[in-house]
Amino acid sequence: MSHRETDEHSGVETTGHEWDGIRELDNPLPRWWLYIFYGCIVIAAIYWVFMPSWPGVNSYAKGMLNQSDRVDVAKQLEALQTQRGAEGAMLRSASLETIEADPKLQAYALAVGQSVFGDNCATCHGVGGTGSKGYANLRDDVWLWGGSLQDIQHTIQVGVRSEDPQTRQSQMPAFGRDQILKPAQIDDLTEYVVALSRRPANAAAVARAAPVFAEQCVACHGPQGKGNVALGGPDLTDADWLYGGNQADIREQIWNGRGGVMPAWQGRFSPETIKALAVYVHANAGGQ
Amino acid sequence: MTVVIDRTKPEAPKTGPVSAAAKARAKGFTLGLYKPRTPIYPKLVHGQWRRIKWILLIVMLAIYYVTPWIRWERPGALPDQAVLVDFAGGRFYFFGIQLWPQEVYFITGLLVIGALGLFLVSAMFGRLWCGYACPQTVWTDLFIYVERAFEGDRNARMKLDAEPWSFNKAWRKIGKHAVWLGIGFGTGGAWIFYFHDAPTLITHFWIGQAPATAYIFCALLTVTTYAFAGFMREQVCIYLCPWPRIQGAMLDQHSLQVTYLRYRGETRGPHKKGSSWEGRGDCIDCNACVVACPMGIDIRDGSQLECINCGLCIDACDEIMDKVERPRGLIAYDTDAAVAAREMRQTPVYKLLRPRTAYYAVALTLVSALMIWGLTHRSALDLHVLRDRNPMFVRLHDGAIRDGYTLKIANRSFEAEDVQVSFVGPAGAKLRTPGAKVAGETLSFRVEPNEVRAVRVFVTVPAAAIDATNMPAAFSVRTGRDAMTVKTNFLSGAANAP
């Protein structure tokens, strides 16, 4: 029991605590502070009743309002679907052509597509969709797997060399790495491919490579090197090169037979999102 | 002759009744920085100016309350409200006119016209706006009317305020404030109808479905109306409003203003019925003009900042002049020049046309003409061209270059328009839009009324036509009525690279 006394100067009782000769006055708490404190106690009690509060062993007291952030997110997603409303529903039922031709649906699909593209596709294909070495340019008129709305939609659904059983599949052999062809033959083939794209090449090498091309390459690239969309065989006569168009790039491609992977997006996106994305990609490639 | 009142010097002690403002001023000199408000109890007057004020009050309140309910048929889903500031839709509708946000300069023009109109009217007729048309005056008048209905006229109100609290005092005060708040709520309530479809909003408002802004602004205007017209009254004019300060620059000796004819009124003094008027002025110092004044001033002190030219003192004085059988017009709308002339027994000259008024009139005419020309000649068609920046250009398999553009075509008319889009630039350019079957020289887009349609347009230029990395180009749009061309560029990068 500490000793209580009254401070002479202020006439207030002290708490009896003393530190180095300094004694503490026992002034009452300010009233406003006290009332707020009581108020907080009352609010805390109310809070326990309505909001999640007490932890249990396996669960917790959920409170009368049943408030939960998880439920809120579900509600917000539901609200978003409602908000998308008519256009969202139309996107589900309308054909790709209809979506692209109708001004309102097109604007809606482009908006959805842009957002989805930015979040998921831009990583490889670039924000503008122009791709880079090894990643396809989606803005030009060259399409390995076809550039129609349906082709694009299908490619997005199943991906390329993905884990989807239906995936777009092509595999160029690694002619050099796997020693299918000799280095000299590959040098000649490189000249041949350069010649295919109407650029000056070593005529003797081109002549030497012709039978090799006919034997090894025509199955996918076609006898004229025009490619084959059904097999994903690229056109070698145009100015578009996935892995680069100079001699060293071409030789490296023949040597290693590289091929990238695009994930299958069906299952990750709803069908209407894929539709919107297909329209977005198609429209931004000129809509042909 | 302009009477200059020097308030830096204490006023000479006056005999007879003292105006409320004079009392407050006297207090202000002794009590520090801020002047306490002296309550003003304006007395009801009868007369022509009071009648005009009643009529204008009814007319202007009617305009304010009725306008949002006027319907005006517009095609399609456009709102059918004649006057509507549609913030959500970004449109301002005024009967047959609709303005888009980028045409806000028409509103600026309207404000310029309003200001010039005010200048012109002030230079010719004084502060007519303040006395008759200003919302502060109109609502204050209405509030005083309510006050009078509950508490009686000036003397009864003064007596009531001096009394201790009683049931009689309480119900009169509560009643007055309740009606004031009601009017305030009505004011705020009518205001929000200008921003939303009125019939929809009025039901939504009561079931809690109206936008938050509607409730906020309704509450805001309820409070400001209640405070401004109920409590602040003349203080708003004297301390808050810039116009009384500015108007000194508009007025001159030829401007009409409420004037006490000093030469005729002085020497003032009480007058006994039947006694002679010889050797004295017509003013019998009855104080009727002072007690009638809603601003609490004594007009006999000359023209002053507080005077809103409402003419109530004229009515009050005329009534007295009739009673004492002297000619009316001891206080009247008059000009300083005319008063001075009459004092010299010359014929007063009224000059409405002066350099000042001519300038204002010419400026007003010019701005109005410009506005009307702008409104009647504005194009219903508008075009904005946004060139794709990523990618800036795309090279196609045959070496041709394709640039992408987003065109925003605005149709400000009330009818759907087929807009023809063409491209002026490198030779052989072909246009294509997603969803269209073929590419061509021109494209056609249907733009719904009162809408902006954003369309993607791709321009393909064959390799042979490309001779620079950056080529000037332009898009043209045309409808049956309007046409417009907007410059842009066609970028081709390193066009001839392999």
Image: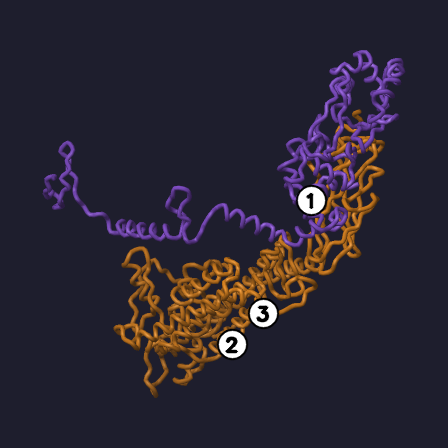
Chain colours: A purple, B orange
> Which residue is label 3 attached to?
B69
What numbered label is drawn on residue A276? 1
In the rendered structure, which amino acid carries the disc numbered 1? Ala
Q: Which mark is residue B55?
A: 2
Looking at marks 3 and 2 on the same chain, the residue that comes earlier in the sequence is marked by 2
Camera-side mark, 3 or 2: 3
Label 2: chain letter: B
The amino acid sitting under disc 2 is Ile
Q: Same chain for marks 1 and 3?
A: no
The numbered mark at residue A32 is none
> How far apart in space, not on screen, are marks 1 and 2 (Cα)?
63 Å
Q: Please tell me which residue lies in front, B140 or A196.
A: A196
Provide residue B440's location: percent of width, then percent of height: 84, 44
How many numbered marks does the figure carry? Answer: 3
**Residue at point 89%, 16% (across, down):** A207
Callout in the foreground (1, 2): 1
**Residue B290 seen in the current view:** no
Badge 1 and badge 2 both on one subunit: no
| B306 in relation to A234, above or below | below
Figure quadrant of the C terminus of chain A: top right
Out of A138 and A199, give the one closest to the viewer: A138
Is residue B118 visible in the rendered image? The answer is: yes
Say what secondary structure mark 1 lies in.
Answer: helix
Q: Position of residue B423 (x, y in %)?
A: 79, 43
Task: Judge left or right: residue A237 versus residue B233.
Answer: right
Residue type beneath disc 3:
Trp
Contact? badges 1 and 2 (CB < 8 Å): no
The residues bearing labels 3 and 2 have C-alpha atoms spaced at a distance of 21 Å
Position of B126 compared to B16: left or right? Answer: right
Tell me if mark 3 has few (under 14), some (14-19) or many (20+) residues whose alpha carbon lies within 10 angstroms of its own: some
The subunit letter for the residue under badge 1 reads: A
At label 1, counting other C-alpha atoms closer than 10 Å, the crowd grade (few under 14, some 14-19, many 20 or more) is many
